[in-house]
Amino acid sequence: MNIIVDKPQLVRVVLLYLNKNFGNLTPKTNSKFPNSVFYVNSDNEVMMEYGEKVVVIHYKQIWSKIESLFHLEYKDIKSIMKVWSEETYKLEDVKPHYGQDVFENRWKRLTN
């Protein structure tokens, strides 16, 4: 059986997935990085960082899961992450990117 899903339907499904799994992140600040807000999960792990109109999304925990589960490309994920971060977390006019290595090491230092 083949199921055909158009792009608006797929976007809705991805947004539902994001909200179900990452829609309850808690914003936190840190004096080491006064221009950033860190969004942490219930285990106090940083999942997103927002500062100066840029939101950096945890690659391993969020971005790569969207890539593999929904077979989306970078530009499509970026577009969906923009909608999600603006609607769910009320961030304005953001530019989403994913964070790997440098950001993840920085985030680990914040939560230890």
Image (cartoon, rainbow, N blue to C red):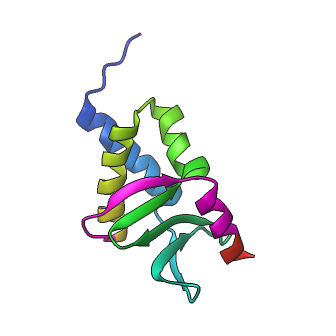
Outermost residue to the bottom: 31
Q: Quadrant of the N terminus?
A: top left
The residue sitting at 32% across, 55% down in the picture is: 82
Residue 77 screen position, x and y as percent: 38, 43
User: Where residue 101 appears, x then y in whole percent?
Assistant: 64, 54
Q: Quadrant of residue 31?
A: bottom right
Q: In screen coordinates, is 24 left or right of 16?
A: right
> Is residue 45 positioned above or below 61 on the image?
below
| Magenta run includes residue 42 | no
Q: Position of residue 64 (x, y in %)?
A: 54, 41
Q: Quadrant of residue 92?
A: bottom left
The count of marks equals: 0
Q: Residue at x 59, y 62 (%)?
A: 103
Q: Nearer the viewer, residue 1 or 112?
A: 112
Q: Is residue 97 magenta?
A: yes
Quarter of the image holding residue 74?
top left
Q: Could you tell me which residue is drawn at 24 percent across and 37 percent down?
A: 8
Q: Residue at x 33, y 35 (%)?
A: 10
- The percent coordinates of residue 93 (x first, y second) are 24, 65
Name the residue furthest front.
Answer: 102
Query: In the displayed image of the protein, which residue is found farthest to the top?
Result: 1
Q: Is 91 in front, or is 51? A: 51
Q: Is residue 54 above or below residue 66?
A: below
The answer to which of 48 and 51 lies nearer the viewer is: 51
Side of 91 relative to 111 (left or right): left
Stretch in magenta: 90-108
In the picture, the quarter occupied by the C terminus is bottom right
Nearest the viewer among 52 and 37 is 52
